[in-house]
Image (tube, grey):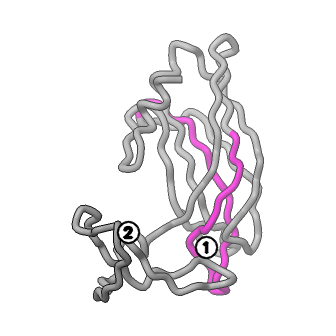
Amino acid sequence: MMAVYDFDRFSKHDAIGDVKVPMNSVDLGHLIEEWRELESAEKEEQEKLGDICFSLRYVPTAGKLTVIILEAKNLKKMDVGGLSDPYVKIHLMQGGKRLKKKKTTIKKNTLNPYYNESFSFEVPFEQIQKVQVVVTVLDYDKLGKNDAIGKVFVGCNSSGTRCSPRRKWRSR
């Protein structure tokens, strides 16, 4: 697949359209020049919420789970000025109940916040297979309710389309 984007120097590039060319139908031994009509950009591409980078570490002997929120990139614009005031909430869950919650500092006027903030939770070894970590990125609003930008679930009963957090969690 080849995608065409509208370049934006100061924020996220906008998808214009794409072309799918099956590679088994192309003779790569020769120069190819052909015209194809662009199809509208994938809906999934237009609804990108951004990316978050975080790490998890569990020390069984200490019964300590550490979550480090490193940074987020290309977050969805939530404020009128085209930026956001993002912060991250971390919930430790078990059986649908919230056991503990922690949150990062608020980073003002950015779509690419850098945190490098560490949070520790006491989780006994016999409970680690039963807990779930929920990482939620929110946009802080002075007036009214803070808006959720996106969420990631890791651990027990988690699933996803890109990878299996549950499998990764259990293999550590």
Of helix, strand and loop, which one carries label 2? helix
Alpha-carbon span between mark 2 and mark 1: 29 Å
State the quadrant of the N terminus. bottom left
Q: Residue at x 66, y 73 (%)?
A: 84
Q: Residues within 10 Å of mark 2 (few under 14, many from 20)?
A: few
Q: Position of residue 19 (x, y in %)?
A: 32, 78
Looking at this rendering, what residue extends furthest in the front direction?
Answer: 29
State the quadrant of the C terminus. top right
User: Looking at the picture, which amino acid does disc 2 mark?
Assistant: Glu
For marks 2 and 1 on the same chain, the one whose residue lies earlier in the sequence: 2
Q: Relative to 17, is 96 above or below?
A: above
Decide whether residue 148 is among the magenta residues. no
User: Looking at the picture, which amino acid does disc 1 mark?
Assistant: Gly
How many callouts does the rendering have?
2
Which quarter of the figure has residue 158? Answer: top left
Residue interval drawn in magenta: 68-95
Q: Position of residue 69 (x, y in %)?
A: 69, 47
Of helix, strand and loop, which one carries label 1? loop
Kindly identify which numbered label has been placed on residue 144: 1
Q: Position of residue 22 (x, y in %)?
A: 26, 66
Q: In this rendering, would 114 be left or right of 49? A: right
Q: Residues within 10 Å of mark 1 (few under 14, many from 20)?
A: few
Q: Position of residue 136 (x, y in %)?
A: 56, 53
Q: In this rendering, would 32 be left or right of 144? A: left
Q: Residue at x 38, y 46 (%)?
A: 160
Q: Residue at x 49, y 29 (%)?
A: 169
Camera-side residue of 83 and 51: 51
Closest to the camera, between mark 2 and mark 1, is: 2
Kindly identify which numbered label has been placed on residue 90: none
Kindly identify which numbered label has been placed on residue 44: 2
